[in-house]
Each structure stands twice: as structure tokens, then as C-alpha cells.
């Protein structure tokens, strides 16, 4: 190509010195060159403008655009050989940034046949309707360039269009067609239609191009029933309707027999349903396996609601290379025709209910095998272990019980991922040589029956999981030679001895999990400067001494759990300078002393969980500590986008005290917030500033020596679910503001010196008496002491008798009064008996109270008049 254009290039240089006046046919027309240069001026070059990293290479193509060369020689510009008009403009990944206007000079290029503007940054720009004026256009790609709003209806005017691709990887749906049915109906020459994450939000029209070879409408919110016309497309090779959960796909297989050229079918997330007889139907994949699909290379039906077994009498699919049926409800055994496919390279049957054994594979091209989360049994086929091209093998969460010999993977020289977790694998000491797996990167042996000393994986490993086994002995310092190690999970074994000090020197380690072992001694690990450590968990060991000060070098640290050890140190407030620390648990150690804070405004800025319980801390609770806990307030940015703390490979977990019991959080949501300072020797008042932590879910200050009144500001903790202030010295009344806590499910104020009435409220009415016991001055529900007025009413002389209460001058003696009371008492008991029998005590007590009040007042007035007469 370069040699053909070289003479033209030299000629162009000479002619361009004379201007654009030449009329030679192979020169770029002057008006088109000027239009391109004006288009260039509209945008700046931004190295980060190419979106989402999909560009294999970024070329600043417009930098070559200048008047010294013919425009047909500019990068991204191609001209017709006969007319010299610009017919192709490829500016994909050109790092362009700016607004794309409807007045753009690019629309002067009326002869364009191919236009690619993908992977730039026209953020906030509407797709101009002027695109509908390119009447010769055959190829249009507007993907991932930041366009927003509607796809103009004028696009449907492009009657010669064969390729249309619009993809939007941004958050949410920013693009939608003006009229999707009109768009498809008019584009009768389309071969490839690719709309991904475009909000179509309509049904697929009945009539569209009969030439379609590729139809991709992934995650477009199309709904309704897939038109039967799709099954008549003779040239269809790629069909992707995945992630459209309201789309119904009915498979009349007798109508699809002609699609022998179908190469790939993706229906992930699509609701596959029956159609009425007599049309051939299927529920599940049974009818899908059509003998006539001899050319099919890829079949993806993952993440649907397919049920039942895979049919065993299938003879087609001899060209099948990729088979994905994961995340359905399929059961039964894996049929032998799958393992007999001669060209199979990618097989994913994970997350189903398959049982039985796996048959030997015929294919020698296996590259990716995922059979995890089923009920498959031993043995592992030898043909699977001897695959020289195998890079990914997942057999996790099954019932395999083989005796592992890593020499059986000797032919799998490029195996990068091996997941055997959640099975019953075992091994003998002499069969722990893992160095045959020389390329292994992800190695997962969690939750098996492995015994003996801790094996050292190959030096290539990045993620090593071997927790929840029965490994014993010490952690060898040779593990520090794993230069690529990022995650080391040794939790819940029987390992002993010290934590090797050199672990802190592994330059890439992000997660160090050694919890629930028998490790002892001091933590002598010296974490290097700017260590990438994100999570350090040594809970449940016998570690002694001080908390290593070198943790201050771990600026990325999010989770630190040193709980349930024998550490002896003062409050490590220097940890508050770690900018990303979200979880701090030091519970059940021998830590002591007061909490002394500095006036640093960035103290614990991201902390969500702090657990200092069951130590020997004393002194007052410093208000300034709680003022700095910005991560426990709702206006924090992370609160709006909750996530699990951790990565896709490792999710952190922690044990906390909540609602009066020990609770293990298998995964920690970033919005879960807890303060637990219980079982220490704290004194003084609760700082009212705690009420500003309005995202707090658990607050436990029990078993201390706190005193004073319970601050009313606790009523501002609107999402609080658990509050424990028991076994302190609080006095005064329970703030009525606590009755407004509508989410609170656990409350314990027991064993204090509280007085007065228990507030009434919807949640308070659900608590047992144990929540308030040990407070002699408390009254009201649910305690036995009544909260009503128990004093005898004082006799008051009315200022003037009511006219309606005047009698006829009869004189009433004390005997008469007593007789009246006696009769009233008898009548009252009779009414009580009747009302209790019909189970209406509430109405009864209200009536008696009102009746008694009226009688007493009437007698008082009569007695007063009698005394005045005397």
C-alpha cells in the first residue's frame, strides 16, 4: 500500500506548493480537504479520551492532517481511486475530545461510504440528525464516544447501510433509538446490527433485513416475543440476545432448520419458553440440539431458567467449539456426546445440578473447563488432566475425593487457574510437589481434607488459597520467595510458630490471612514502605507483644483484624492516620490505657467498623474521636454506592457482637457500620456527638463504668438496629427520642440506675423486660410497675357548682354516701365480670375510669355545698 502511494505522495507535495487548484483526478478535492481541517479544529487531543481501554493502540490520526500533503494520504482517510473523493473516514481511538455539533463540517463529505467515530470523547453531545444525509454510507460506528440522548430517526434514511454498531459502556443507559421499529424496517440492506446497552425498550419488529448475518441486542431492554422471522434468516451466523430478561424466545425448531450457517447463539438472561403444539417446542435445552446445526461453533444459553437433563441422543454439533450452559437448573448426568465432541475447547456447565462421573474427553484442544458448583463425583478423567492446552480448570464445590498427585498435571504446562476448593480431596506427604504447575497463577484448595505441613506453591502463583484444611507445622520462610504473590490465605488450619517476619517484604502482597490457627510469639513482620497490603487478618491465634508499628507504611490498608489474641499494648491511635482503613478489630486482647487523640482532622476518615471490646481501656470517651468518623455519616460517597470490601478474588469477613449475640459477617458491606467499646473500664459521659454518626447500625458500650444521662442525640441514629448500654451507671430517664428509632431490633439498658417511665413506641413495645431489668426506678411496659399516677387525688373545693349538678335540697349524710359506694362497687364488679367474659377489657377500663371520676366529682361538690349550709 505504501509503495503504491509513494509517487502520488511526491507529486502531491509538489502540487500542494501551488495550492489546491490542480484538477488531476487523483487529488483530494479542495472543499473536502478544507472540511476535514475545519473538523479537526473542533476537537482537542486528549490521551485519555479513548474510552474504556478497548483500543489496542491509540493514534492521534488528525496530527497528520495539514496542507503540505494530499488529504487522501492523511491517517484515517481513504479516497476513491477514480474520483479522489473521500469515501472512508476512520477516526476510531483518535483521542478526540470536544462537542460534536450538527454544524460540523464533516457533513459536507457527502460521498462517505464508511464512517467510524468510535472510542473518542464527544461527551454530552447528541447524535446529530445530519448523519441521515450520508446517502452512500454503508458502515457506521458510533460506539463508546460519549453520545447521549436519542438515536435520530434520520438514521433510517441510510438505505445502503450494511453495518451499524452503537455500544455504550457507560453507567446506565444514555442512548435510545427514536423509533426502533422504523429503524429496522427501513434499513433493508443491513448485514450486521450491533446495539449494546442502548435502551431500546420496545419489541423487535416483524420485518427487517433478510440479509442479516449478525444481530446483537445485548442488554437493550427489548421485550416481548422474538419474531418468528428470525428463524428464517438463511445467513445468520451470530445471534446475541443476552441480558434481556423480559424477552421471550420461543423456539419452533422446525422453522429454524434452514439456519445451517448459524455460528454463535447467545441467549444469556433471556426467558426461553414453550410455544403451543403442533409446533415443535422445548422448555429447557432439549429441542435446541438440532441435528441440522452442523456448522454451529458456539452455543451460549447460560443464565436462563433451563431445567431437566441434557438430551443424550444428540448427533449433531460436530463443529462445536464453545458450549456454555452455566447458571441454569439442569440436572442428570453429563451426556457422553459432550465429551465426544472432537473440536471442543471451551466448556462451562457450572452452577447446575449435574451428578455422576465425567467421561473421558475425545478432544485434545481443551482450553477452558468449568464444572464448578455441581454434584459431580470422582474420579477426574485422565484425558482432562493430560490436556496440553488447558489453561483454566474449575472443579470446585462438587463431591470429588481423589488423592491429589500434582504429577498428574505434568502435561498441563500452561495451566494458569486451578480451583479444587469445596471438595474432599486429600493427599499424602510425598505427593505435595506442586512445581509441575510451573505457570499456575490462581491456586485454590480451600475446604478440603488436606493434612501435613504447608506446601510451598510454584513461584508463579499470585493467588494461593489453602484455608479450612488440617495443615500443621510452621509457616516456612521460603514462602517469602513468591515474588508475584498477591493473596495468601492460610486461615483455619493448625499452623503454629511465628508469622515469618519476611512476609512484610513481599512487594506485591495485598491480603495476608492467617486467622484461626495456633500461631504464637510476637508479630515481628516489618511491612515495607508503601506496602500494597489491603487486608491483614490474624484473629484467633496466640500472638503476644505490641502491634507492629510498621503497619503505618500500609497506606492502602482497609481491614485490620488482630482480635482474640494476647497482644499487650496501648491504644494504637497512630492507625488513625491510615487514609483507607475501614475495619479495625482489636477485640479480646490485653490492650490497656486511655484513648488519647490528637487534633488531626483526618483521624480514621474512612472507618466503618471499630471493635475495641474486651480489653482494659479506661478513661473518658473522647468526643474528638467520634467527630472524625466521617465514614459513619450518610453523606460519604461510598454510602451511595455500597460494595463488598475486598476484591473479586477475596472478600473480607469479620466477627462482631450484634443484637446480643456473636455474628460473623461472611462479607462486609461498606455501608455496615459498628462501634463496639464494650467490656472495658471507660468512665464519664457518652459524648453527644455520637448522634452525628447517622449511618451507625450497631452501638455497643455495655459493661463499662459510664454514667450521666443517656444523650438525647442517640435518637438521631435513624438506621440504628442494635443498641447495648447495659451494665453501666447511667441515671435519669430514658430519652423519649429513642422511641423514634424505627429500625432498632435489639435494645439493652439493663443494670443501670435509670428512673421514670419507659417511653412508648412501636419498637419499644416489642422488647422484653430483660431489656430494662436491674433499674429499680423504671416503670411502665413491659415491667410490672405501672407507669400511671398512683397518688391519692387531693380534695379540691370548687369555685362554683355547676347548674346541672344541683340537687333538690336533700341532705346527704356519710351513711348515704357509703351506701352509694357499696351499691356502685357491687355493680362495678358485675360489669367487670361480664366484660372480661366477652374479652373487652380495654373498653371496660376506660369506661370505669370515666365513671369513677364523675362519681367522685359529684360527691365532692355535694359535700362542699353541705358544709357551706352549715
Image (cartoon, rainbow, N blue to C red):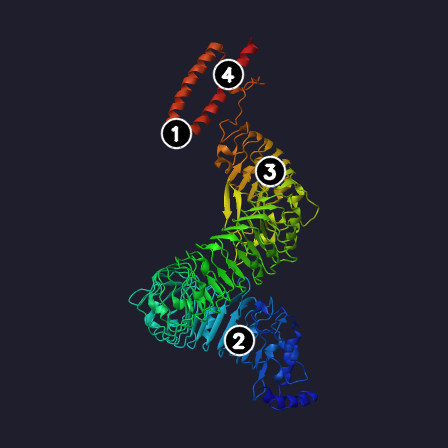
Pointer 4 residue: 859
Q: Quadrant of the N terminus?
A: bottom right
Instruction: Indicate the position of residue 512 as horizontal and vertical percent values.
Output: 56, 55
Looking at the image, residue 374 lies above or below residue 58? above
Q: Residues within 10 Å of mark 3 (few under 14, many from 20)?
A: many
Label 1 or label 4, whichever lies nearer to me, is 1
Pointer 3 residue: 680
Q: Is residue 522 left or right of residue 195?
A: right
Looking at the image, is mark 4 or mark 2 earlier in the sequence? Answer: 2
Q: Dot 1 lies on which element?
A: loop
Label 4 or label 2, whichever lies nearer to me, is 2
Looking at the image, is mark 3 or mark 2 earlier in the sequence? Answer: 2
Q: Dot 3 lies on which element?
A: loop
The residue lying furthest to the left in this view is 278
Which of 191/661 is in front?
A: 661
Q: What is the spatial separation of the Cα atoms under label 2 and label 1, in whole angstroms?
A: 79 Å
Viewer can see residue 765: yes
Label 3 or label 1, whichever lies nearer to me, is 3
**Which of the 4 image quarters holds residue 409?**
bottom left
- Determine contact: label 4, label 2, CB under 8 Å: no
Amino acid at each position: 500500500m505504501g509503495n503504491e502511494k509513494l509517487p502520488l505522495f511526491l507529486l502531491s507535495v509538489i502540487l500542494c506548493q501551488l495550492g489546491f487548484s490542480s484538477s488531476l483526478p487523483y487529488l483530494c478535492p479542495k472543499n473536502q480537504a478544507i472540511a476535514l481541517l475545519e473538523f479537526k479544529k473542533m476537537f482537542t487531543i486528549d490521551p485519555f479520551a479513548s474510552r474504556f481501554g478497548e483500543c489496542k493502540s491509540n493514534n492521534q490520526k488528525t496530527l497528520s492532517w495539514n496542507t503540505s500533503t494530499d488529504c487522501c494520504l492523511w491517517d484515517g482517510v481513504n479516497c476513491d481511486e477514480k474520483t479522489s473523493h473521500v469515501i472512508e473516514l476512520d477516526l476510531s481511538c483518535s483521542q478526540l475530545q470536544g462537542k460534536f455539533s450538527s454544524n460540523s463540517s464533516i457533513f459536507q463529505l457527502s460521498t462517505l461510504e464508511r464512517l467510524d467515530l468510535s472510542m473518542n470523547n464527544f461527551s454530552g453531545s447528541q447524535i446529530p440528525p445530519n448523519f441521515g444525509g450520508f446517502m452512500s454510507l454503508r458502515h457506521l460506528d458510533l460506539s463508546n464516544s460519549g453520545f447521549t440522548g436519542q438515536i435520530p430517526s434520520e438514521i433510517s434514511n441510510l438505505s445502503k447501510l450494511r453495518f451499524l454498531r452503537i455500544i455504550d459502556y457507560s453507567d446506565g443507559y444514555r442512548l435510545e433509538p427514536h423509533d426502533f421499529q422504523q429503524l429496522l424496517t427501513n434499513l433493508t440492506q443491513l448485514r450486521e446490527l450491533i446495539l449494546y446497552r442502548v435502551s431500546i425498550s420496545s419489541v423487535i419488529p416483524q420485518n427487517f433485513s433478510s440479509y442479516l448475518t449478525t444481530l446483537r441486542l445485548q442488554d437493550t431492554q427489548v421485550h416481548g416475543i422474538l419474531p418468528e422471522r428470525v428463524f428464517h434468516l438463511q445467513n445468520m451466523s451470530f445471534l446475541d440476545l443476552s441480558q434481556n430478561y423480559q424477552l421471550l424466545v420461543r423456539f419452533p425448531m422446525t422453522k429454524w432448520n434452514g439456519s445451517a450457517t448459524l455460528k454463535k447463539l447467545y441467549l444469556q438472561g433471556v426467558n426461553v419458553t414453550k410455544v403451543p403444539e403442533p409446533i415443535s417446542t422445548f422448555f429447557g435445552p432439549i429441542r435446541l440440539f438440532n441435528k441440522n446445526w452442523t456448522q454451529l461453533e458456539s452455543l451460549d444459553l447460560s443464565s436462563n431458567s433451563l431445567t431437566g437433563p441434557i438430551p443424550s441422543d444428540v448427533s449433531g454439533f460436530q463443529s462445536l467449539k464453545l458450549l456454555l450452559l452455566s447458571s441454569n437448573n439442569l440436572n442428570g448426568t453429563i451426556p457422553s456426546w459432550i465429551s465426544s465432541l472432537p473440536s471442543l475447547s471451551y466448556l462451562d456447565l457450572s452452577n447446575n445440578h449435574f451428578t455422576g462421573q465425567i467421561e473421558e474427553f475425545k478432544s485434545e484442544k481443551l482450553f477452558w473447563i468449568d464444572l464448578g458448583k455441581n454434584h459431580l463425583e470422582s474420579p477426574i478423567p485422565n484425558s482432562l488432566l493430560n490436556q496440553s492446552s488447558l489453561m483454566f480448570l474449575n472443579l470446585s464445590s462438587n463431591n470429588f475425593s481423589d488423592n491429589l498427585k500434582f504429577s498428574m498435571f505434568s502435561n498441563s504446562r500452561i495451566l494458569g487457574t486451578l480451583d479444587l476448593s469445596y471438595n474432599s480431596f486429600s493427599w499424602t506427604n510425598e505427593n505435595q510437589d506442586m512445581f509441575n504447575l510451573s505457570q499456575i497463577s490462581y491456586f485454590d484448595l480451600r475446604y478440603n481434607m488436606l493434612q501435613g505441613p504447608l506446601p510451598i506453591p510454584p513461584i508463579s502463583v499470585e493467588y494461593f488459597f489453602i484455608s479450612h484444611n488440617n495443615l500443621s507445622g510452621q509457616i516456612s520462610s521460603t514462602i517469602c520467595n513468591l515474588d508475584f504473590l498477591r493473596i495468601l490465605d492460610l486461615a483455619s488450619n493448625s499452623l503454629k510458630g511465628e508469622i515469618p517476619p519476611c512476609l512484610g517484604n513481599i512487594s506485591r502482597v495485598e491480603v495476608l490471612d492467617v486467622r484461626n490457627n495456633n500461631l504464637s510469639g510476637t508479630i515481628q513482620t516489618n511491612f515495607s514502605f508503601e506496602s500494597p497490603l489491603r487486608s491483614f487478618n490474624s484473629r484467633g491465634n496466640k500472638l503476644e507483644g505490641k502491634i507492629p508499628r510498621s503497619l503505618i507504611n500500609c497506606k492502602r490498608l482497609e481491614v485490620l483484624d488482630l482480635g482474640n489474641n494476647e497482644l499487650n499494648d496501648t491504644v494504637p491511635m497512630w492507625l488513625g492516620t491510615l487514609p483507607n482503613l475501614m475495619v479495625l478489630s482489636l477485640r479480646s486482647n490485653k490492650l490497656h490505657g486511655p484513648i488519647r487523640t490528637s487534633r488531626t482532622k483526618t483521624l480514621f476518615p474512612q472507618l466503618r467498623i471499630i471493635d475495641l471490646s474486651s480489653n482494659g481501656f479506661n478513661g473518658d470517651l473522647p468526643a474528638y474521636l467520634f467527630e472524625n468518623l466521617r465514614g459513619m455519616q450518610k453523606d460519604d460517597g461510598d454510602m451511595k454506592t455500597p460494595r463488598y470490601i475486598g476484591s473479586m478474588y477475596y472478600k473480607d469477613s469479620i466477627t462482631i457482637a450484634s443484637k446480643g449475640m456473636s455474628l460473623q459477617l461472611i462479607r462486609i458491606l461498606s455501608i455496615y457500620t459498628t462501634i463496639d467499646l464494650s467490656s472495658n473500664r471507660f468512665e464519664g459521659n457518652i459524648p453527644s456527638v455520637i448522634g452525628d454518626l447517622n449511618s451507625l447500625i450497631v452501638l455497643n458500650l455495655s459493661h463499662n463504668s459510664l454514667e450521666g444521662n443517656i444523650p438525647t442525640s442517640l435518637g438521631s441514629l435513624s438506621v440504628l438496629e442494635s443498641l447495648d448500654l447495659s451494665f453501666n451507671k447511667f441515671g435519669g430517664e430514658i430519652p423519649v427520642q429513642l422511641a423514634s428509632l424505627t429500625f432498632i431490633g435489639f435494645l439493652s439498658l439493663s443494670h443501670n440506675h435509670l428512673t421514670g417511665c419507659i417511653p412508648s413506641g412501636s419498637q419499644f413495645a416489642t422488647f422484653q423486660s430483660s431489656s430494662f431489668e436491674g433499674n429499680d426506678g423504671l416503670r411502665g411496659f413491659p415491667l410490672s410497675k405501672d407507669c400511671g399516677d398512683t397518688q391519692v387525688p387531693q380534695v379540691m373545693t370548687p369555685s362554683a357548682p355547676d347548674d346541672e349538678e344541683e340537687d333538690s335540697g336533700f341532705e346527704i349524710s356519710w351513711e348515704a354516701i357509703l351506701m352509694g359506694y357499696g351499691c356502685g362497687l357491687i355493680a362495678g364488679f358485675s360489669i367487670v365480670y361480664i366484660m372480661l367474659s366477652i374479652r373487652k377489657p380495654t373498653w371496660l377500663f376506660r369506661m370505669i375510669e370515666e365513671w369513677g371520676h364523675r362519681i367522685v366529682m359529684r360527691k365532692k361538690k355535694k359535700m362542699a355545698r353541705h358544709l357551706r349550709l352549715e
